[in-house]
Image (tube, grey):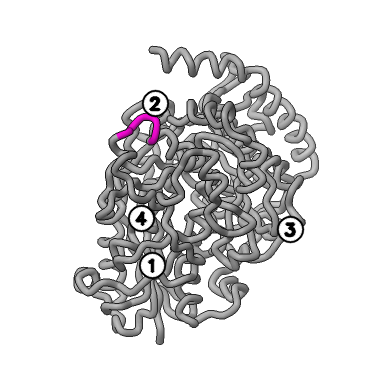
């Protein structure tokens, strides 16, 4: 029997699994860590945190599975979207923390690009637009604000590329991660863009020459790493990709029309397409499956589950204590009181822009907002409004996707922590109008990594085979009356942002001054 290992380096934890060729999980492990936020709207991580967690997770799953290391066919590692990537010197030593996807410090570089670069041409080349979310604006921030780092930088490496280098000694970037940098990658030619790099003033030499598919083998495991991990020296290390795309693959999204929402700390809704169009405000990159033909296009909210966690931590201490005494989750207590409230939480609307917002509004200065409060409202109204607000953000992205997708299936698959909530699944069905399916098994990016590892090793040939590894189950059907009501509330959700945008920006600027 052959085995594969999949590891995903996430924003707050690294998770890994070891599976057999039939998709049966034999061992799993995880390690948690924190995001560093030294200033408002900054978010960074040092890569050694990821390396330590990855090595510990790999060693644990290999040890706990107890299988013959010679039968472990390959290992694949995906990672969070690393934004700028890790600036490394000639010896591939990190020079500065990685400015990760949620970092918003590059707003002034966005303005610079808008003023001095032909953005219409840039968008045409890359299939992506302009925002401080994108790695190329973060790279420009380092160039402008950290000249000593810039002068020593040899490469900018995505997180999984850096870890793969530490495991193999080989430098390569997968097409998915390269495309998600935006700005410097030609989405049509599947290569770094010389013209775009010149337009931006980013030397093309800072981008590793070797680009590989996500199921491509970067190299063999180094002997010293093999001894640490309990693996065989030379075990193939597979390139991997951006965790959102890999998790989408894990949910069976392999063909145009398939679409899935992943709702965890952040929210990503994505689908497979054959072309990219930056005008619709979504993010596009080569898919981790069939990257030379297929494009993964997605939109997302920066703070989805993070909005829920923030609300509970700040306002629900009594419910947390009660849940602890009753041996249940705080979510269960809050849902019991809020599930029967009418759509719209009886007049409340929440904008989940707690770290600015990504698609489709692309506004780093947007802020979280709760509108409609009165003395009548309780924490339970607010809790429901938070769930609805995150779901309106999902619907906002779906509406943009409808304008550029070849087609979308008439069912929506939802994965991530939100899928544990029956109440939230019903809200999603009622707001989006899609019947909601979830996956019986716990499906996350490591499962997609295992698929890519199995494909690289020749264990699997057809991408459709991944659907044999999980079981879809129906969770919620939209109620026509509630859907109609939510459509009206959604119009207000959009208009609230438009009305408050100027005030949000003024508050943001005042905060920066102070």
- Label 3 near label 1: C-beta < 8 Å? no
Disc 4 residue crowd, few under 14, some 14–19, many 20+, Cα 10 Å: many
Along the line of sight, which residue is nearer the eye, 125 or 163? 125
Please give the name of the residue rendered at 31% of the width and 52% of the height, measured from the top-left corner.
50
Residue 504 higher or lower than 89, as above or below: above
Q: Earlier in the sequence, mark 2 or mark 1?
A: 1
Along the line of sight, which residue is nearer the eye, 217 or 314? 217
Residue marked by disc 3 = 409
Is 281 left, or right, of 466 in this rendering?
Answer: right
- Label 4 near label 3: C-beta < 8 Å? no
Tag shown at residue 17: 1
Marks 2 and 1 sit apart, C-alpha to C-alpha, by 35 Å
Q: Position of residue 353 (x, y in %)?
A: 54, 30
Q: Earlier in the sequence, mark 3 or mark 2?
A: 2
Residue marked by disc 2 = 40
Along the line of sight, which residue is nearer the eye, 274 or 482? 274
């Amino acid at each position: 029997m052959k085995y594969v290992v999949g590891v995903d380096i996430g924003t707050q934890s690294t998770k890994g699994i070891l599976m057999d060729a039939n998709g049966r999980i034999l061992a799993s492990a995880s390690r948690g860590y924190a995001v560093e936020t030294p200033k408002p709207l900054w978010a960074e991580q040092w890569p050694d945190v990821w390396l330590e967690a990855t090595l510990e997770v790999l060693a644990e799953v290999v040890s706990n599975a107890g299988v013959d290391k010679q039968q472990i066919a390959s290992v694949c590692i995906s990672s969070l979207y690393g934004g700028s990537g890790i600036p490394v010197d000639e010896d591939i030593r990190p020079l500065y923390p990685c400015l990760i996807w949620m970092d918003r410090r590059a707003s002034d570089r966005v303005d610079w690009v808008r003023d001095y670069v032909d953005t219409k041409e840039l968008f045409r080349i890359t299939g992506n637009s302009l925002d401080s979310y994108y790695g190329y604006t973060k790279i420009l921030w380092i160039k402008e604000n950290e000249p000593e780092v810039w002068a020593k930088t040899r490469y900018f490496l995505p997180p999984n590329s850096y870890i793969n280098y530490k495991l193999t000694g080989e430098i390569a970037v997968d097409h998915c991660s390269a495309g998600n940098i935006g700005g410097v990658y030609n989405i049509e030619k599947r290569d770094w863009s010389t013209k775009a790099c010149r337009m931006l003033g980013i030397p093309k030499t800072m981008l590793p020459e070797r680009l590989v598919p996500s199921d491509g083998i970067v190299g063999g495991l180094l002997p010293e790493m093999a001894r640490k991990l309990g693996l065989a020296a030379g075990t193939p290390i597979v390139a991997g990709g951006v965790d959102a795309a890999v998790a989408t693959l894990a949910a069976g999204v392999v063909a145009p029309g398939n679409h899935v929402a992943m709702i965890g700390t952040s929210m990503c809704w994505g689908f497979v397409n054959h072309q990219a169009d930056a005008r619709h405000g979504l993010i596009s990159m080569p898919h981790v499956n069939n990257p030379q033909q297929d494009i993964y296009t997605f939109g997302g909210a920066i703070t989805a589950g993070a909005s829920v966690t923030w609300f509970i931590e700040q306002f629900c201490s009594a419910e947390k204590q009660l849940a602890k005494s009753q041996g249940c989750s705080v979510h269960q207590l809050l849902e019991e009181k809020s599930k029967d409230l009418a759509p719209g939480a009886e007049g409340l609307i929440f904008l989940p822009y707690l770290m600015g917002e990504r698609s489709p509004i692309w506004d780093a200065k947007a802020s979280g907002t709760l509108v409609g409060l009165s003395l009548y409202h309780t924490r339970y109204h607010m809790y429901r409004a938070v769930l609805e607000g995150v779901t309106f953000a999902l619907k906002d992205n779906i509406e943009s996707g409808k304008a550029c997708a070849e087609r979308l299936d008439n069912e929506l698959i939802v994965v991530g922590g939100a899928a544990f909530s029956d109440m939230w699944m019903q809200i999603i069905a009622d707001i989006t109008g899609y019947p909601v399916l979830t996956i019986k098994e716990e499906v996350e990016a490591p499962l997609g990594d295992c698929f890519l590892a199995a494909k690289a090793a020749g264990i699997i040939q057809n991408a459709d085979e991944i659907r044999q590894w999980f079981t879809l189950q129906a969770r919620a059907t939209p109620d026509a009356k509630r859907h109609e009501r939510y459509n009206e509330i959604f119009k207000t959700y959009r208009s609230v942002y438009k009305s408050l945008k100027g005030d949000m920006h003024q508050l943001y600027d005042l905060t920066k001054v102070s």
